[in-house]
Amino acid sequence: MTRQEPSQEPRPWVLGLGALLLGALAIGGFLLLQSKTHPGERAGVAVTEPDGLAARLRLAHRYLDARDHQRALAEYLAILDQDPANVEALSHAGWIAFESGDVDMGERLVRQSLRRQPDGPEALWFLANIRLYGRQDPVSARPPLRALLARQDLSPDFRGEVERLMTEARE
C-alpha cells in the first residue's frame, strides 16, 4: 500500500474570492504591473512595501476606504494566505464580495470571521447590512444589530448608524 500525501487543495472560499479577484485584475492588472510607484502611493497612501501583516492590513483598509476594491481584495487575500484566521481580512473580504454582488460569499466570510471573534463590531455591522440589504431579511439582521447596541464602546456616530439600521430592520 502506498501512502498518500494530505490534500493541498485550496479552500472553496479562497477559490471564489480568487475568481472575483482575477476578474478585477484583468481590468487593472496590466497598469499596476507597469507602474513604477507602489500602488499605495497612487492612492495617496504613504507606505513602504507592506511586508508585515499589520502594514498590509492598513493598506487594504485604505484601499477599501478609497473604494478601490480590486487592490483592497488583493491585500486581504495576501493576508489570508499568510494568516487564514485573520478576522479583519475575512470580514472585509466578505464585505467586498457582498458589494461585488456575491451575497452568499460575503455572508459566509463575515460569519467565518464572527466564529473566530463573535463580538467583532465591524463584522457584526457587515452581517447586519448583508442580511438587510443583500438578503432582504430584516428579521435576521436584528440579532447582530442587538449585539452592537449592547456594546458600551461604540462611538456616538456609529451607535446612531446602528440605531438607524435597527429602525429600518423593524419597519
Image (cartoon, grey):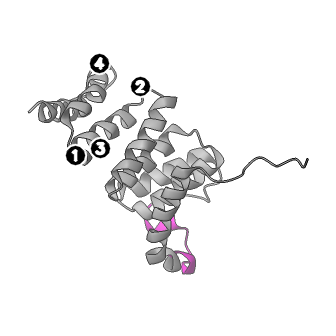
Contact, CB < 8 Å: mark 1 with mark 3? Answer: yes
Cα separation, mark 1 vs mark 4, equals 22 Å
CA gap, disc 4 and disc 3: 20 Å
Mark 3 neighbour class, 10 Å CA radius: few under 14, some 14 to 19, many 20 or more: many
Looking at the rendered structure, the secondary structure element under dot 1 is: helix
The residue wearing badge 4 is: 150
Residue at image point 22% right, 40% down: 132
- Residue 49 or 9: which is nearer the viewer? 9
Q: Amino acid at mark 1?
A: Tyr
Residue, disc 1: 133
Residue 42 on image: x %, y %? 45, 69
Magenta stretch in the rendered image: 32-44
- Contact between marks 2 and 3 (CB within 8 A): the answer is no
Q: Mark 2 or mark 3: name the one nearer the start of the chain.
A: 2
Outermost left residue:
171
x and y percentages locating residue 99 in the rendered image: 32, 55
Task: Using the numbered discs, state the Cα–Cα distance from disc 2 to disc 3 in whole angstroms.
Answer: 17 Å
Decide if residue 48 is on the left or right side of residue 145.
right
**Residue 119 magenta:** no
Determine contact: label 1, label 4, CB under 8 Å: no
- Is any atom of residue 96 visible in this view? yes
Q: Specify whether 10 is left or right of 8.
A: left
Give the x, y percent position of residue 163. 18, 29
First-in-chain label (4 vs 3): 3
Residue on which disc 3 sits: 130
Disc 2 marks which amino acid? Asp
Near mark 2 (Cα within 10 A), the count class, few <14, some 14-19 or many ≥20, is: some
Disc 4 + disc 3, Cβ < 8 Å: no
